[in-house]
Amino acid sequence: MLHFVFFGGILTDIEKSKIKLQADELKAHRFVNIEEVYKLCGIGIGQRVERALEAIRSNTAIYWDF
C-alpha cells in the first residue's frame, strides 16, 4: 500500500468561510488539532498526519516504512 499526503497551503479565514460542501457527499467539515485527529481517526491515521505535518514544517519529504 502506498499513501501520499499533499500540502494544499494555509487557508485564510475568508477562504474558510467560502467552503461549500456537496450535500450529497458530505454532511460537515471542521479543522482540528493533532490530538483530535488521533481521537477521530485512531493511531494509524494519526501517525500519518503527524508525519505529514513534520514534513511540512521541515520542508522535506519523509519516507516512513512502518
Image (tube, grey):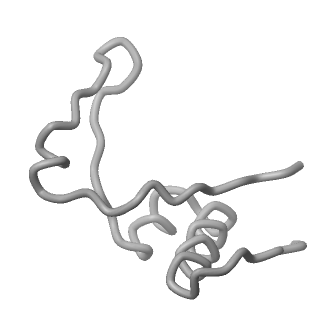
Q: Where 15 sits versus 9, above or below?
A: above
The residue at the point 66 percent across, 67 percent down is 48
Residue 39 percent across, percent down from the top left: 46, 65
Q: Where 30 sits versus 65, above or below?
A: above
Which one is nearer the viewer's eye here, 13 or 30?
Answer: 13
Q: For the view shown, which residue lies furthest in the top direction?
A: 24
Q: Quadrant of the C terminus?
A: bottom right
Residue 24 percent across, percent down from the top left: 36, 12
Asked whether, in this view, residue 62 is left or right of residue 17, the answer is right
Would you identify the image quadrant in which residue 12 lies? bottom left
The residue at the point 30 percent across, 27 percent down is 27
Would you identify the image quadrant in which residue 52 lies? bottom right
Q: Where 42 sits versus 24, above or below?
A: below
Asked whether, in this view, residue 53 is left or right of residue 22, the answer is right
Residue 50 percent across, percent down from the top left: 57, 75
Query: How many marks do you count on the picture?
Result: 0
Residue 46 percent across, percent down from the top left: 58, 68
The residue at the point 82 percent across, 74 percent down is 64
